[in-house]
Image (cartoon, rainbow, N blue to C red):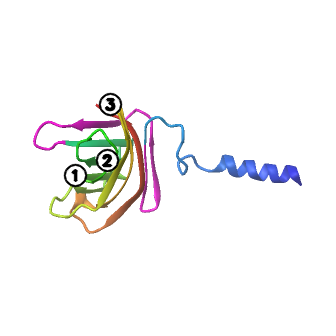
Amino acid sequence: MNRLLLYFFCSLLFCCSSQDHPNPKADIYIYADVDGKPFRYEGEDNYIAENYHAGSLPRFYFVGEISEYEGLGLTVPPLSGKPETVNVLGALYRNSRFDTYATGYHGELDRPVTGKCTITRVNNEVVEGTFYVDVYSEYGKGNKVLKVTNGRFRVRYN
């Protein structure tokens, strides 16, 4: 009986998708739930993060792409060097070749942006935080809304 319970427990442990459970040891990651479905980016391929102070649009942004047609990005005001909560300036979510959801700087500018980002840790190389935001179909011009919730990130930036 004990072996049967052990087998059942191990089966549950190893059959769960790693896509559903973020890797707590990942060095670089962007995680979120998009309308309740997990988005999990890990690694250093196909991502960018920059703290941009110059030009007419100072900002901090990051984008992680799981594939050519699936990715998530967020834009907020430039990093101040300390933990803080800021308004999201724009967001972009792509889940297929044909579906791109956006808001703010990445989409329709006339629609108010609903979202916050909390910077929990920042130094000269790495920034960590949490976020949530709503994005809209057709690059922000459509009426279908996706709720991006439980967002967490740790990225290296320039």
> For this rendering, which residue is in front, 148 or 121?
121
- Which residue is under mark 3? 124
Residue 73 shows which numbered tag?
2
Specify which label sits upstream in the sequence, 1 or 2. Answer: 2
Tell me: residue 66, above or below residue 91: above
Q: Amino acid at mark 2?
A: Gly
| Image marks 1 and 2: residues in contact by CB distance under 8 Å | yes
Q: Residue at x 36, y 52 (%)?
A: 96
Q: Quadrant of the N terminus?
A: bottom right
Is 44 contained in the magenta span?
yes
| Image marks 1 and 3: residues in contact by CB distance under 8 Å | no
Q: Amino acid at mark 3?
A: Asn
Image location (x, y in percent) of residue 72: 35, 48
Question: Dot 2, crowdedness within 10 Å: few (<14), some or many (≥20)?
Answer: many
- Which residue is under mark 1? 106
Q: Residue at x 31, y 37 (%)?
A: 49
